Image: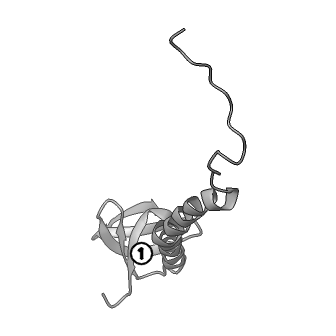
Amino acid sequence: MFISEAYAQTAGGAPAGPDFFTALLPWLFIILIFYFLLIRPQQKRQKEHRNMVEGVQKGDTVVTQGGIIGKAKKVSDTEVSVEIADGVQVQVVKSTLADVRSKDA
């Protein structure tokens, strides 16, 4: 009638698609960009923060993530007793410290 019959083309007439490696190459490039621009710097910052928190000593000035500044009075494995005013001490978890300044600061 009005519609002609469709026949499959031979392999020589059809354009070849990209091979597996060529199709995978852009994704590998994107993963590398994410690693070097996002993942690696974040891991480096986490390692520096962990080392800084583990190095807290009595007398250091510390800043909590809540913005409270005080002096470390007692340091244990997981907690730090921070004096925020004369005679006022609070217990904070070490991992919640945002910054550790030396005794001189």
Residue at the bottom extreme of this rendering: 104
Q: Could you say which is closer to the camera, residue 23 or residue 72? A: 23
Vertical order, 95 against 9 (above or below): below
Image point (52%, 81%), residue name = 55
State left or right for residue 6 relative to residue 55: right
Which residue is the extreme one toward the front?
1
Q: Position of residue 77 (x, y in %)?
A: 59, 69
SS class of the residue under badge 1?
strand
Judge from the rendering whether residue 34 lies leftward or rightward of residue 69; answer left or right. right
Residue visible at 60% across and 63% down in the picture? 25
Mark 1 Cα shell of 10 Å, populated few (<14), some (14-19), many (≥20): many
Instruction: Please identify the quarter of the rendering in which residue 64 is found.
Output: bottom left
Q: Is 12 in front, or is 104?
A: 12
Quarter occupied by the N terminus: top right
In this rendered view, identify the residue nearer to me: 35 or 94: 35
Q: Give the camera-side residue of 67 and 70.
A: 67
On the image, the x and y values in percent for residue 81 come to 44, 67
* Residue 99 x %, y %: 38, 74
For the question of whether residue 94 can be seen, the reply is no
The count of marks equals 1
Snapshot colouring: one colour
Mark 1 = which residue?
72
